[in-house]
Image: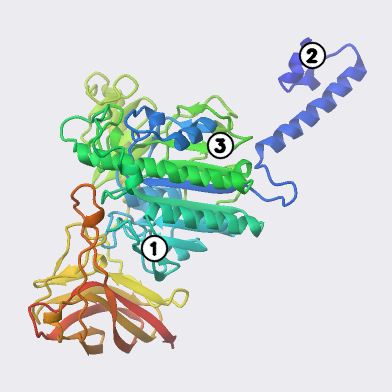
Amino acid sequence: MKNWRKFRRGDACQARPQNHLLRIVACLLAALASRSLARAAEPRADALTNRPPNIMILLADDQGWGDLSVTGNTNLATPHIDALAKSGAQLERFFVCPVCSPTRAEMLTGRYHPRGGVHGVSTGGERLNLDERTIAQVFHEAGYATGCFGKWHNGTQYPYHPNARGFDEYYGFTSGHWGIYFDPPLDHNGQIVQGKGFLADDLTDHAMTFLADNQQRNKPSFCYLAFNTPHTPAQVPDAFFSRFAQSDLKLLGGKGESVPKTRAVLAMCENLDYNVGRVLAKLDELKLADETIVIYFSDNGPNGIRWNGGMRGIKGSTDEGGVRSPFFIRWPGHIRGGLNVPQIAAAIDLLPTLADLTHVATKPSKPLDGVSLKPLLLEEKDDWPERMIFSHWSGKVSVRTQQYRLDATGRLYDMPADPGQQTNIADKSPDVANKLRAAVAAWKSDVFAGQTRDDRPFPVGYTQLPLTMLPARDGVGHGNVRRSAQAPNCSYFEHWTATSDQIEWDVEVATPGRYEVELWYTCAAADVGSTIEISMNGAALRTKISQANDPPLRGKEHDRVPREESYVKDFKPLQMGTFELKAGRGTLTLKALQITGQHVADVRMVTLKLLSGD
């Protein structure tokens, strides 16, 4: 019995059984057990195909930690996400960024978002620098089929586009938010298409098709399903909203909460759960469940005041409530169901963790800030080194250790004892406070080193994706021209009323050659007839707006509460002709030479299509 206990501890060969033969057998058994454990720690592959595990990342948009029943919210039911959590591991203290695009950049690169040039959520500040290597590139080079479905939010024009960042397949929208969630215009591999039905459902349909297609091709899949909800506008099908329309909420978020908005958000969260259930059922149907690593998390704190476990801060805040996200990961046969991981972790850890779990080489061109969580997920070690995780937005930085959070103003909180950040203990623990303040200063000096004002133009004219979209959010209006809403992402230009007005885009042409120009516009019948010009670096096109296109605003008919975002219209393209563009940087300028009515037109975007290059 003594020797058997030693064998179970893995040191049978160090035992001294009285029978020499028993010692030999024990050593052989130990060796076999060691090899078996080593194989169990590796990604389990299909016996016939020897295919590595698939990866399925499900990312919610603006869902808070408290927007799930598994985290204690009794206002709603999320049974499929709850089941995912219970069948895998839950990272109890998982941190993302205060807003959308930085979290996506950190997940994609394993590096803090300022390093990659992501400093905003629109007008170009959301773009991930082209010298950053993404998780999709890592897995694409390892032989995976890679697909992204949904909200990208790290750049629109090639080579910022998902198809240039490692994704074979893309279907969704590239900006920070979208103006309508029913039958919206979308981007499919760089082409403008029309979505079908409710957007979150449509994105899920395409992701499931991607999984099935690659299962038939016997190719492992890296699938990134980036939902657009519960980000506003608050739109959700009746089947999900009906039970919340007049419901009394059991849990409230306190002063400032908009209960009607919370009802709509919870309905969107239940729709998310429905779609997560559809994905999990599809994996079962394809017999891929045991061979797929499934991850679910959100990109920032709740987009409004509502119940969030009593934490301080919402979306946009570097406090706990603004950056703590639910995080669940399932891999049957490898990650124990019901495992709770208390150690702090973050979005920067996803790339190194998934690469480590699948034995895929990351080949980083730059040092990673994240670490592999594999030892925690596979319970390979009990000890874990102390670490710091930094949260940044709009010049504010907080830092989290396992026990403490130093907020953006230098106040210190003992998080296990004070999860709501009510009591500043900086005076009682000056050594800790000073240490963390010094760490924040050093972090700022490191990640912002050498950074200057963002002067990146919008690229045009790559042969890999000849159509370049230049939406209103990336342009600048002058004179009377203004955006249709304060948030630029899904806006359009309006109040174009004078010949002195201009709309400009700062662009850089990669390939000299002939370009086809289209203006996506609306124009009332009374305003038809204006002559407009688009020009750049000496090349110019003039045309007359000869057809009316005056559709009604869309979106309000689906809204559950009033919105802040712009409504949308059915813009249509006006073919302006073709002109020759030289390579290099310049200002693409749109103006009116002659105006016949009160307004020239409303402008959603300009597209430039490379027809032939020099």
In front: 360, or 383? Answer: 360
Q: Which quadrant would residue 183 be assigned to in this image?
A: bottom left
In front: 56, or 614? Answer: 56
Q: Earlier in the sequence, mark 3 or mark 1?
A: 1
Q: Earlier in the sequence, mark 3 or mark 2?
A: 2
Task: Indicate the secondary structure of the residue bearing disc 1.
Answer: loop
Task: Indicate the secondary structure of the residue bearing disc 3.
Answer: helix
Residue at numbered disc 1: 195
Q: Pointer 2: residues within 10 angstroms few (<14), some, or many (20+)?
A: some
Amino acid under label 1?
Gly
Q: Residue at the location (11% across, 71% down)?
A: 495
Q: Residue at the location (80% across, 16% down)?
A: 15
Real-space CA distance between mark 3 and mark 1, rounded to the nearest whole angstrom: 38 Å
Position of 112 relative to 68 (above/below): below
- Asked if residue 363 can be seen in this view, the reply is no
In front: 395, or 105? Answer: 105
- Asked if residue 457 can be seen in this view, the reply is yes
Q: Pointer 3: residues within 10 angstroms few (<14), some, or many (20+)?
A: some
Mark 2 or 1, which is nearer the eye?
Answer: 1
Left or right of residue 495, residue 322 in this image: right
Residue at numbered disc 2: 3
User: x, y (%) of residue 607?
Assistant: 32, 76
Which numbered disc covers residue 374? Answer: 3
Left or right of residue 108, residue 284 in this image: right
Amino acid under label 2?
Asn
Image quadrant occupied by the N terminus: top right
Amino acid under label 3?
Lys
Labelled pair 3, 2 in contact (Cβ < 8 Å): no
Task: Indicate the secondary structure of the residue bearing disc 2.
Answer: helix
Real-space CA distance between mark 3 and mark 2, rounded to the nearest whole angstrom: 31 Å
